[in-house]
Image (cartoon, rainbow, N blue to C red):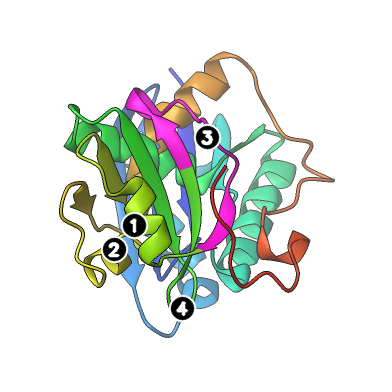
Amino acid sequence: MSYILHIETSAKRCSVAISKNNTLAGSEGITSEDYVHAEMLHVLVGDLLTNLNLQMSDLNAVSVSRGPGSYTGLRIGVSAAKGYCYTLGIPLISVDTTSVIAHHASTLSPESTRIIAMIDARRMEVYCGIFEKQGKRISHDQAIIVDEKFMAEYDQADTVFAGDGAGKVNLLNARHAAVHCFTPSAEMMVNNVWERFHEATFENIASFEPYYLKDYLPGITKKTLV
């Protein structure tokens, strides 16, 4: 029996979950425009453990959403995950935030053959990745502007726009694609993480860093998907 703690802090919702093997055991979360992650993350973890009658020592691994997303949120989540793993001597697992979004979207629109995972950035900008059915990645994450050119290429009947940035396509009158607006949460990480845990795909706790994306693409204001 393996208990895994999941941490998702890439957006305005700060959430944690615990899975027993590949099944969700419980979750806690809070959404705030003020990004209360630093104040609430450890409180949420403590409350969740108490509700499930578990101790920190019962955990077999910790997973964290690595980004892209909010710089501050990612930094807080990754720092906490690394601290737990180092203290408890258990492995660290990371998953791409867009992959988590795509996997969840595939359950909402199983008929779609292309999923565009979209993380809200600023104005009409999103962090975006393209996936095939069932969440198989076919493009790297990129920072793009949602505009008429983007819509002309991707607003197709076989496509679903998903994530907390997906609402921006409605501002440009999406007509053909399905649109699912939701904020990524720790509950959505369970299946992605279980595969990595089962395969022993772990991170180096000392060197692991969040994937900020924009830090590695300075000055970009518009980019199209490839």
Q: Which residues are magenta?
A: 130-144
Q: CA distance from mark 3 to mark 4?
A: 25 Å
Nearer to us in this view, 101 or 175: 175
Q: Amino acid at mark 4?
A: Val
- Residue 136 in percent (x, y) is at 45, 25
Q: Residues within 10 Å of mark 2 (few under 14, many from 20)?
A: many
Q: Residue 151, labelled with which disc?
A: 1
170 or 5, nearer to the observer? 170
Residue depicted at x 67% and y 33%: 90
Location of mark 3 (residue): 59
| Residue nearest the viewer, comparing 183 with 168 | 168
Residue at the spot 54% in from the left edge and 15% down from the top edge? 198
Residue 220 vertical position relative to residue 27 in the rendered view, above or below: below
Instruction: Name the residue located 84 percent from the left edge and 46 percent from the top edge.
Output: 207
Mark 2 touching mark 1, by CB under 8 A? yes
- The residue positioned 59% from the left and 53% from the top of the image is 142
Q: How many marks?
A: 4
Residue 19 image point, x, y percent: 37, 33
| Crowd around label 3: few <14 · some 14–19 · many ≥20 (10 Å) | many
Please, is residue 143 above or below residue 192 in the view?
below
Counting residues from the N terminus, which is met first, the one under dot 3 or under dot 4? 4
